[in-house]
Image: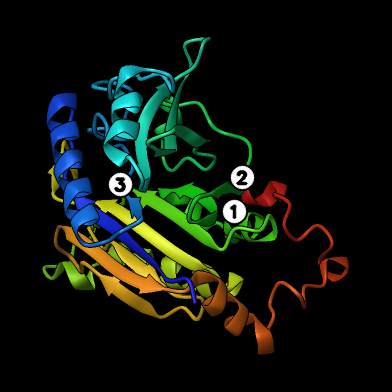
């Protein structure tokens, strides 16, 4: 039995990269002291998220995948596997809302957010693929925030062999109809429902990190968690900042969940036709 101790963070991050890296350093050190080997940090933890979804003003600092900030992140990770969000700029000057997975040896994988909510497209280009990858802690997949609302995204990663999906977010509470109790906020309930559903329907381990606190016009939901392949929440920060930690034998729990009810095994793609394709009426 090879158990893996993993953790997901809910914490605030802003524009000051030095401050962000100092917070990340402390979070990594605390996780290491707890025996964590896989750590998920929030979307945009290097440089903060957008202050508003109304336009491209006050955008996060644009970083390069081979730049000093990502090298520092890898140095902090050392023997751990760490996933973190940042604003990536490519050689053509296009910015992406990206997630990077690192160890002390460097970058294992990079992912550019595919699905863009509201007017996020004013600030970022869109990615175009979901791909799992091998890591020292197993085969992983990465998603960012709004991606979790699309079952096909998690399904693509599960079909590519991912047994753990790391979903990092800057998921806010409702701006138009806020609930006085954040735990009852409709956007908080949706966040939790998506996390549990994606784990259950693909019978995978789901590690969800999120921003906490407020930034610009946004108030974030926190809600970092670890979900097992049955959709059960093993650990959560609830509506506060913190770190959700759980330990389990990933291969064993995935195999056990799929032994009787194999959702991937029993797929019938021949019966679905174009159901997964976009329809003009939905545009």
In which image quadrant can residue 139 be found?
bottom right
* 250 relative to 74 in the view: left or right: right
Decide which of tag 2 and tag 3 comes sooner along the chain. 3
- The answer, for residue 208, to whether it is visible in the render is yes
Viewer-side label of 1, 2? 2
Of the residues tagged 1 and 3, which is closer to the observer? 3
At x 25%, y 65%, the residue is 244
The disc placed on residue 42 is 3
**Residues at circles 1 and 2 in contact by the CB criterion of under 8 Å:** yes
At horizontal 23% and vertical 60% (from top left) the residue drawn is 177
Q: CA distance from mark 2 to mark 3?
A: 19 Å
Q: Which residue is mark 2?
A: 130
Local SS, label 1: helix
The image shows residue 110, relative to residue 207, as above or below, that is: above
Q: Where is residue 241 shown, x and y percent of the image?
A: 15, 57
Tell how many labels.
3
| Colour theme | rainbow
Q: Residues within 10 Å of mark 1 (few under 14, many from 20)?
A: many
**First in sequence: mark 1 vs mark 2:** 2
Q: Is residue 152 above or below residue 48?
A: below
Asked whether the viewer can see residue 217, the reply is: no
């Amino acid at each position: 039995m090879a158990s893996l101790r993993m953790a997901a963070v809910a914490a605030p991050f802003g524009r000051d990269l030095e401050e962000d890296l100092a917070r990340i350093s402390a979070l990594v050190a605390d996780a290491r002291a707890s025996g964590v080997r896989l750590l998920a940090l929030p979307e945009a933890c290097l440089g903060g998220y957008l202050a508003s979804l109304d336009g491209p003003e006050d955008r996060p600092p644009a970083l390069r995948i081979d730049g000093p900030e990502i090298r520092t992140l890898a140095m902090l990770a050392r023997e751990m596997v760490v996933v973190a969000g940042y604003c990536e700029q490519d050689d053509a000057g296009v910015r992406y809302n990206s997630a990077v997975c690192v160890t002390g040896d460097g970058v294992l994988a990079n992912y550019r957010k595919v699905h863009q909510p509201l007017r996020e497209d004013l600030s970022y280009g869109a990615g175009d693929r979901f791909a799992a990858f091998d890591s020292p802690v197993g085969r992983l997949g990465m998603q960012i925030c709004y991606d979790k609302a699309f079952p096909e995204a998690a399904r693509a990663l599960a079909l590519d062999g991912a047994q753990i999906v790391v979903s990092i977010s800057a998921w806010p509470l409702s701006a138009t109809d806020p609930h006085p109790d954040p735990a009852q906020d409709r956007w908080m309930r949706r966040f939790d429902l998506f996390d549990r559903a994606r784990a259950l329907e693909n019978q995978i381990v789901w590690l969800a990190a999120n921003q906490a606190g407020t930034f610009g016009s946004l108030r974030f939901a926190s809600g970092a968690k670890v979900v097992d392949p049955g959709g059960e929440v093993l650990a959560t920060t609830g509506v506060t900042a913190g770190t959700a930690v759980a330990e389990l034998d990933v291969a064993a729990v995935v195999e056990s969940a799929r032994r009787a009810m194999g959702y991937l095994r029993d797929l019938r793609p021949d019966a679905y036709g174009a159901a997964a394709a976009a329809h003009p009426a939905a545009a």
